[in-house]
Amino acid sequence: MLTTHATRVNIQIRALDATTMNTNELAKRLNEEGFNSHFYCIGPGWRRLGNGFALDKVGDSFEWFYVERGQKGQAERVFASEEEACQFVYEALSKDKWAQSHLVGMFESESEAADLARALSRQGIQSETDRIPYGGPNDPRFRVFVYGRGEIRVTGRLARILVRWRAPAAIPPAE
């Protein structure tokens, strides 16, 4: 019973923290929770994004906007307070599974992607695969994703798995 109570208190504290965050705390929290920073930017560094959402201070307000090909789009939301902006961004990104996705493999063959997904599963790592028309409809690629903190938590084991799947049959001697 004490554990349940402690868990409830912890959840209530985390919910309160979401309403009082500033942009530095938001960026830190998103990183700690395994969000993929290739899909969003908090602060003035948004020009580094190819495509993704960004939150930045503009004058006395905070703007949430989409960046496409490194170019700032029109503000989708404008907030009077930093706390309100941070709460909105945290909730919006938390609802978007792609904001927490991490690409761990891309293959020409579906069977290679399935092999990696099975290897991840044997390690207790949930993954998802998809198919994209890489060079056109007759040139597909098969991708494997993991989500959230899972990718960060298993980096060591995952690196060994990826090396095993992509290692050449024979490594030529160094010259």
Image (spheres, helix red, strand yellow):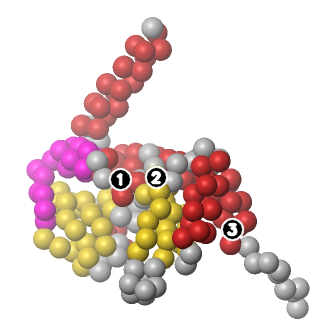
Expressed as whole percent of the image width and height from the top left, the position of residue 17 reads: 31, 34
How packed mark 1 is, by other alpha carbons closer than 10 Å (few <14, some 14-19, many 20 or more), is few
Identify which residue is drawn at 24% across, 61% down.
56
Cα–Cα gap, marks 2 and 1: 8 Å
| Residue matched to label 2 | 147
Cα–Cα gap, marks 1 and 3: 26 Å
Magenta highlight: main SS: helix
Up/down of 26 relative to 108, above or below: above
* Of pointers 1 and 3, the one earlier in the residue sequence: 1
Question: Mark 1: which amino acid?
Answer: Lys
Up/down of 16 relative to 53, above or below: above
Question: Mark 3: which amino acid?
Answer: Trp
Which label belongs to residue 16? none
Q: Secondary structure at mark 2?
A: strand
Identify which residue is drawn at 88% across, 91% down.
175
| Residue matched to label 3 | 165
Identify which residue is drawn at 35% across, 53% down.
97
Tell me where the magenta segment starts and ends, as one range.
Answer: 75-92
